[in-house]
Amino acid sequence: MSQRKLFVFGHLPNGFVPAGRLTLTEEKEVISSSFTYGTRYIDRPDRFELDPVSLSLNSGQTASGLELFPANQLTQFGGIRDAAPDAWGRRVIESQRKVPANSLTEAEYLLGAGSDRVGALDIRESLESTSRQGVANIQRLEYMLEAAERIDQGLPIPTRLADVFDTGPSAGGARPKASVRDETGLLWLAKFPAVGDTFSVADAECLTLKLASLAGLSVSEVKVLNIGKKPVMLIRRFDRYWQTPGSPIKTDTKLHETLPKSHATEQRLPFVSGLTLIGCDEFDSRHKSYGDLALSVRSHVHPALIRSNREELFGRMIFNIFVSNDDDHLRNHGFVRDPRLPGWCLSPLYDVVPRPGFASERYLHLQVGNQGKLATLDNAMSAFSAFTPQRTTAIAIIRRIWGEVRQWKNAFENWGATGRLIDQVSSAFRDLSEISSRDLEKEIRHCEP
């Protein structure tokens, strides 16, 4: 058993500042954690809470100097765990260090992620440690693709490719990915093909996210680049935005759509996953529901956005049912802290991939309604009151989503999808009659648009 003390930094408008000290007690895995906010950090008017559940700052000065512990008897703080590398990032670190899988301590993974990780945190060995930026230029995508393929196949990385990856992104899962900057300075998450793909996941995910945007859901800009005849999807990092110092951003401006311009600087948005907002670990995630997420929205999202975020969450559940996206686990739901409120809100949608299949009964990862994970609209409507008090509102959301998804083939073709891709993913997209009872189908069809 060992104990490791690390220092957590938070990114404020003028850069990283020390936020507090993290203590990890580890054996083969983390046994316990504690955290102490720094007094100077607490006193800053622009400081933010690292974890809205376990490290809340709503109580103000009462958190100053206290040793705090994770809520719900968890061994780690969710907000800090979200700043650790994801499954792919861990593989990159292990490959770079030439060590076996899962052989490093959590402290080493936390330190190895670098300063460009998702969100606004950095974890360092000491207060004197400096930041480690590691984002490659978009022109290096060809080399990154080659390195990703080697790591995905369990092959060593040649010396010439050793430093092409940062290991920061953690919003997502095990698929090969890396952050890159384009020629204007914008930060993107590049997602590469993986061993075992049976269709172009990059094209399918990009087009499905575009479809979600058409259906009125919040989505960052997405596009696909062909690198060496292989598709790589780029999605704009929604945890970054651009602001000219001293110039406030209008409340109706979407931060993930702001652009680099003269005198503007890149700022960072704190990020936590749905796993953190609910206050559970991965083992409990499979037993959680969209209703649990909606309840957490009510508890932790800024009051001005609770209604719209709960309706957005319902729309995302409905969209996942229509496109058979069963990778909707709690890490694939995110929240960012908007400094204009200030407070937490749903992040743009990410990691939505249609899963082709021929089973008449399909299931999501999260529970949908009274029939558990069953991916039907009737099941979703059995729990609509967790998202909106009005049944008519829930039906209107379903109709809006269905209105776009039912035309998905035309949309995909207009965006350049090949006939082969459309055939490959066609069985993922459900017709209204497949996922609703006759009475509910009638109600949706006759709902006023």
Image (cartoon, rainbow, N blue to C red):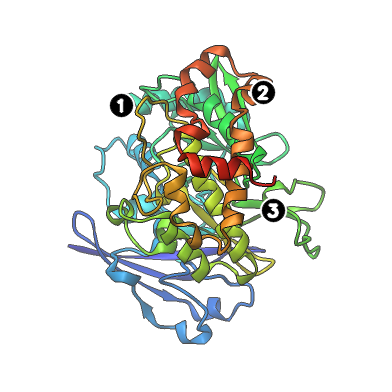
- In the rendered image, residue 21, in percent from the top left (x then y), is placed at 41, 71
Tell which of 416 and 41 is nearer to you. 416
Residue that label 1 marks = 154
Q: Please, what is the three-letter code of the amino acid marked with disc 3?
A: Leu
Res 269 quadrant in image? bottom right
Above or below: residue 65 compared with residue 21 = below
Inter-mark Cα distance, 1 to 3: 38 Å
Q: First in sequence: mark 3 or mark 2?
A: 3
- Where residue 442 is drawn, which disc sits there? none
Q: Please, what is the three-letter code of the amino acid marked with disc 1?
A: Gly
Tell which of 428 and 111 is nearer to you. 428
Q: Residue at x 23, y 55 (%)?
A: 29
Q: Quadrant of the C terminus?
A: top right
Q: First in sequence: mark 2 or mark 1?
A: 1
Q: First in sequence: mark 1 or mark 3?
A: 1
- In the rendered image, residue 329, in percent from the top left (x then y), is placed at 39, 47
Above or below: residue 243 compared with residue 145 = below
- In the rendered image, residue 219, in percent from the top left (x then y), is placed at 62, 43
Inter-mark Cα distance, 3 to 2: 25 Å
Q: Please, what is the three-letter code of the amino acid marked with disc 2?
A: Trp
- In the rendered image, residue 385, in percent from the top left (x then y), is placed at 50, 62
Q: Is residue 107 in view from this perspective?
A: yes
Tell which of 108 and 268 is nearer to you. 268
Mark 2 falls on what kind of element?
loop
Inter-mark Cα distance, 2 to 1: 35 Å
In the drawing, does residue 319 fall left or right of residue 250? left
Residue that label 3 marks = 255
Res 156 quadrant in image? top left
